[in-house]
Image (tube, grey):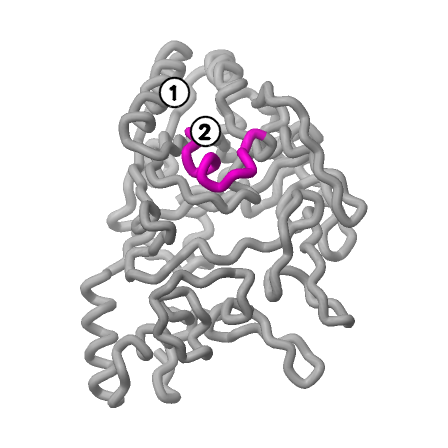
């Protein structure tokens, strides 16, 4: 498990494509794909890399210029976007040190990023023994290999994915950068137009409307306004170098080249016990005299279709975020209240909470 910073300020040869909204201009050619674009691409490989020499590490990073996908390069047509091959790159704090970022700049990063996931495990509720963790997610001080650079490759089919992964591997090998681990990923149900998570619930439904990136703002996916409309979320809530919801602009790290239009990403490998979930739902529903699907919706916070649990609908049709059934926030008694089931993933069946 690692915390990674991503930036595309020097990793694209795509022509600039600025989008202005709400008085904000965002240079989409300096922002890596996946930060705002919600497109589901079916197959992916995560490459975990280690850098032994700073000069060689920087040469590898330079070799990725032109391969990293930016928001500006994403087609407007959803089908064309889903057919893209994409590459993203990020660095851990130790990875930035490995490629030669100065000690002064390294010290200017937030403490959470400097600490890393393992050091903050107690706060996160992780097993302090780290039993079962793959070595790539552990620093050398904890018996791991130490992750420096993360590269994500996504493609619509396995053959295209394998070809692009081989290119990245070759670039790493040519620059004395080691591939210390990989993870494979695939979207369940993506070929049917609706991505699903492992428990069988439609996923990838909500995408916040962000100022300056040309996204629509659907009810419940922005900031509620007194006149009943929804305003886009300030881009600084997602990107460094821009004003956030408080009007503040992050000043760390101290180097603007690493700060501007970059963002932080948390990489965690989790296990979902599908058989255990289904068994527990069945047992609980039987004990409480509930329908299993209703009980499962209470546990997860939404029906398998993606509709909020409180709507009491069993439709298997994927939810359309533009429809009222998908509103994640309700305007009640003059106040905005979130759909507790959708926001707080609590497990409640007939008043019992687990």
Vertical side of 52 occupied by 264: above or below: below
Binning the other alpha carbons within 10 Å of mark 1 as few (below 14), some (14 to 19) or many (20 upward) gives many
Left or right? Give the position of 333 relative to 208: right
Query: Residue drawn at (57%, 73%), measured in percent from left and top?
Result: 338
Camera-nearest residue between 330 and 277: 330
Quadrant (top left, top right, bottom left, bottom right) of the N terminus: top left
When asked about the image quadrant of residue 335, the answer is: bottom right
Which residue is tagged 1?
A: 168
- Quadrant for the C terminus in the image: bottom left
Residue 287 place in picture, x, y as percent: 22, 87
Task: Give the residue drawn at x 52%, y 60%.
Answer: 321
Question: Is residue 278 placed above or below 332 in the rendered structure?
Answer: above
Q: Is the Cβ of the residue at disc 1 closer than 8 Å to that at disc 2?
A: yes
Please give the count of numbered marks on the rendered protein.
2
SS of the residue under disc 2: strand
Mark 1 element type: helix
């Amino acid at each position: 498990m690692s915390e990674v910073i991503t930036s595309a300020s020097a990793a694209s040869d795509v022509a600039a494509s600025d989008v202005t909204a709400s008085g904000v201009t965002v240079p989409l050619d300096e922002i890596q794909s996946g930060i705002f674009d919600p497109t589901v691409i079916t197959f992916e490989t995560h490459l975990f890399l280690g850098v032994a020499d700073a000069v060689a590490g920087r040469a590898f990073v330079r070799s990725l210029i032109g391969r990293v996908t930016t928001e500006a390069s994403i087609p407007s047509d959803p089908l064309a976007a889903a057919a893209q091959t994409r590459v993203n790159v990020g660095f851990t704090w130790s990875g930035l040190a490995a490629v030669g970022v100065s000690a002064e700049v390294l010290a200017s990063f937030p403490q959470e990023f400097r600490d890393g996931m393992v050091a903050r495990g107690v706060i996160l509720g992780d097993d302090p023994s780290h039993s079962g963790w793959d070595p790539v997610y552990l620093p050398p001080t904890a018996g791991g290999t130490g992750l420096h650079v993360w590269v994500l490759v996504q493609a619509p089919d396995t053959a295209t994915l394998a070809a692009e992964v081989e290119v990245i591997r070759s670039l790493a090998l040519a620059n004395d950068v080691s591939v210390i681990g990989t993870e494979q990923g695939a979207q369940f149900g993506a070929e049917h137009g609706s991505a699903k998570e492992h428990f069988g619930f439609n996923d990838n439904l909500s995408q916040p409307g962000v100022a300056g990136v040309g996204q629509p703002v659907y009810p419940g996916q922005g900031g509620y306004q007194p006149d009943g409309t929804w305003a886009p979320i300030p881009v600084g809530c997602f990107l460094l170098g821009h004003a956030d919801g408080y009007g503040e602009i992050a000043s760390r790290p101290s180097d603007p080249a690493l700060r501007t239009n970059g963002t932080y990403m948390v990489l965690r490998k989790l296990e979902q016990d599908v058989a255990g979930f289904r068994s527990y739902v069945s047992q609980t529903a039987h004990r409480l005299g509930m329908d299993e699907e209703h009980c499962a919706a209470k546990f997860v916070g939404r029906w398998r279709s993606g509709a909020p649990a409180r709507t009491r609908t069993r439709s298997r049709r994927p939810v359309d975020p533009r429809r009222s059934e998908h509103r994640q926030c309700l305007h009640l008694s003059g106040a905005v209240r979130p759909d507790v089931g959708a926001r707080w993933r609590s497990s409640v069946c007939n008043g019992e909470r687990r």
